[in-house]
Amino acid sequence: MNETQCAVFQGIVYYYRANQVICRYQIALHDPVDPALLQRALDEMRPLAGWYFQKVVWEKREAHLAPNDAPCRVTVGEAAPAIPEATNDYLFSLHCEGTTIYFDWFHFLADGRGFSPFMTLVLRAYCNLRYGTAFACEMLAEDPPYDPELLLKE
């Protein structure tokens, strides 16, 4: 198993479930959300959060993550799209409605603790654009992948 496949091993169980595990963070703001600014924030943070801009690639019975060059679009509406089918194969969705921003993601990509740094990064960028704040937007560190062979030995 190579390093990329090891990184996916921890989430593979979620991919095979009969019912997908889709998680959601919902953030309520005081002001109506500007979808165009939210799209700009997402686009500007892309180079700082490479792990999240991935897609699942299948080779026979093995899956691994690969960079996804397709556009990642912010949509308007509360309903979560089908992930990854309706999101250009991205494993997350960013959408808004009124004063609320919704982050939906496939548990295959991350759990809540793993997804919150990305969500925080996008929200900081959005606030910087919308309100002229000066929140730092630094590159996200990527955790090293789990080594399934070592886990099995333990």
Image: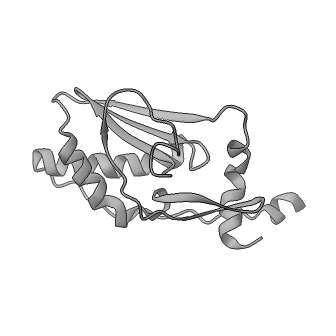
Identity of the residue furthest to the left in this view: 132
Residue 154 seen anywhere in this rendered image of the structure: no
Asked if 154 appears above or below 17 in the picture, the reply is below
In the rendered image, residue 82, in percent from the top left (x then y), is placed at 51, 37
Task: Using the image as rendered, state which of residue 110 and residue 91 is in the foreground.
Answer: 91
Name the quarter where the C terminus is drawn.
bottom right
Picture residue at 72% right of the left edge, 73% below the top:
2
Asked if 121 appears above or below 24 in the picture, the reply is below
Identity of the residue furthest to the right in this view: 153
Picture residue at 61% right of the left edge, 35% below the top:
21
In this rendering, position of residue 109 left or right of residue 8: left
In this rendering, position of residue 104 left or right of residue 22: left
In the rendered image, residue 22, in percent from the top left (x then y), is placed at 55, 35
In this rendering, position of residue 21 left or right of residue 147: left
Picture residue at 19% right of the left edge, 46% below the top:
36
Image quadrant where residue 116 sits: top left
Q: State how the image is colored.
A: one colour
In the rendered image, residue 142, in percent from the top left (x then y), is placed at 52, 64
Identity of the residue furthest to the bottom in this view: 2
Q: How many marks?
A: 0
Residue 36 seen anywhere in this rendered image of the structure: yes
Picture residue at 17% right of the left edge, 39% below the top:
34
Asked if 28 appears above or below 137 in the picture, the reply is above
Task: Using the image as rendered, state which of residue 121 and residue 104 is in the foreground.
Answer: 104
Name the quarter where the N terminus is drawn.
bottom right
Asked if 120 appears above or below 22 in the picture, the reply is below
In the rendered image, residue 55, in percent from the top left (x then y), is placed at 54, 58
